[in-house]
Image (cartoon, rainbow, N blue to C red):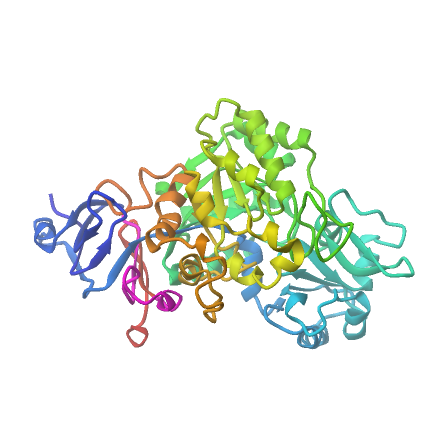
Amino acid sequence: MVAEKVFIHGNIYTMNEDAFHGEAMAVAGQKLVAIGSDEEAAAWIGPETEVVDLKGRTVLPGLIDSHVHTMIAANKFDTGHMVNCFGLSKEEILHSVKEMAKGKKPGQWIQGLGWNQSGWEDTTMPTRQELDAVAPDNPVFLLRVCGHACWVNSPALKLAGVTRDSIAPAGSEIMKDEAGEPTGYLTEKAACVISACLPPDSDEDVKRKFLLIQDKMLEQGITAYNDKCLGTSNMNQREMAQEMWDVLKRMYQDEKMKLRLHVFVQPGQVLDEMYRRGPQIGLYGGRLTHRGVKMFSDGALGARSAWLLEEYSDRPGHTGSGRLTDEFLQNEMKKAHDAGFQVSIHAIGDGAVKQAMDAYEAVNPCKEDRRFLIEHFMIARDEEFERLAGSGIIASMQFVEMSSDMNMIEKRVGKKRALGAYAWRRVLNTGTKIASGTDFPMDVENPYENMYYGVSRCTIDEQPPGGWHPQEELTRYEVLKSYTLDAAYARFEEDVLGSLEVGKYADFVVIDRDYMNCAVKEIKEIRALMTVIGGEIVFQAGETEE
């Protein structure tokens, strides 16, 4: 037997503990048929075999981002339709809104995302009057960087019917001024009241956005990812999940989509219909799967909508609150399990983490292998770390969140509770697996930057020296495992993904330096030179970039 492709002269980290290093790989179909030395691979070369010389470059298994919001992420780059607020001051955002309003007819929506008051000179929450001044004739909806709050103007409030008499849904806030009028800052389900008025995405919008994000992923060496809320393009369009699923299937049928994509859908009528249909696993050659359910126990720390068991240190009397009742959460989890679906719960505050763990224990008292996911697992008490051991729960965590939050976290929750935040070493010490991701676009999509944070516990500027709470740092191997083997395990795909072994998919990335041996600060500078999925080269950097 000969191989269709043979990759030679590589520095290959397989993630197979029994044979961690290799030089060459042979591929037939989508899968690896040999991995080892150049001499061993030579036996697979025939007259028709394509031989690719890796020129000594480092190869890693294809990276898996366990937490992405595709449609929202695409909005970040869709600058012709959206105001990109990431990294901008309030004044710069207002200028951008004013410029976009010039090209809009009265009544047309202006949308944007990524603002973060924590980085502004004045860190108080923005107001509707500021947007009214630059866009008086257009409703404006600007999603906060965390994705759990919005900043809107008076026309948007009017369209949504939000007034001084409006009562926020449970677990959310409509901030009001001293006169009792809405300020234009809303969180969670209250913000969804506004976003429900936004125009829905067309099928062409969906196609364009998925292809845009696919390009971004492939450029980074990401070969698989999890979409944590199919159907959501702003905050609450989950009823579009079926339409988006149908569009995705057509894109895979037409071979426009290459990535191995797992999608998660929020509870609702559409999901109930999907339950009746049953899980869709490994469609189109292992490229597309839906068997995931995503629920939100709380919000975000930046918006102060995360659910804490004790009051916020910087907002006395306020604890945030849960978005779901215990009864609803447990009923939905049981429905999902009975239908053969995996459950993922967003939980940031210690109140939400406790609720998620309580629910998992209630519906799975025998601790069967259900691979329940807790997204973020950001702040936890000692009791919850103890409960993790032997629970079978997987922590879906994002190393980058520590970097973006470390200057805020102690202000929000105090030094004691901060010790239970971003505690990666404590999680691994319980025997729990970490499935790493970025929560893109809420944080950067670059996996190597994310891996750098996991190893260094520093910001992108390499601060503080020695790392923030360095006792929680991970080894390079552990960080890479969270992006490969453990991320694959979290998708029930450890038999076909996560390492470079015979019989597994030939998914890998060629990078420009040796991840295992370069200086720690260089990890964040790594670039992908080639991305391969199922043996097909789906991205290759230009010669000038190498």
- Mark yes or no: residue 147 visible: no
The residue under the point 67% across, 72% down is: 120
Q: Position of residue 291 (x, y in %)?
A: 49, 36
In depth, the one of 536 and 247 nearer the eye is 536
Tally of numbered tags: 0
In depth, the one of 322 and 332 nearer the eye is 322
Q: Position of residue 100 (x, y in %)?
A: 68, 73
In the image, residue 515 above or below residue 30:
below
Left or right of 235, for residue 371 = left
Q: Main secondary structure of the magenta part?
A: loop
The residue under the point 27% across, 42% down is: 504
In depth, the one of 104 and 407 nearer the eye is 407
In depth, the one of 30 and 441 nearer the eye is 441
Q: Quadrant of the N terminus?
A: top left
Q: Is residue 523 magenta?
A: yes
Q: Residue furthest right?
A: 179
In the image, residue 76 above or below residue 424:
below
Q: Is residue 243 magenta?
A: no
Left or right of 89, for residue 465 = left
The residue under the point 54% across, 45% down is: 377
Q: Position of residue 315 (x, y in %)?
A: 75, 56
- Mark yes or no: residue 48 visible: yes
What residue range appears in magenta?
Answer: 506-527
Please tell me in which quadrant of the rendered image residue 546 appears: bottom left
Q: Position of residue 534 (x, y in %)?
A: 29, 49
Q: Residue furthest front?
A: 416
Left or right of 293, for residue 457 = left
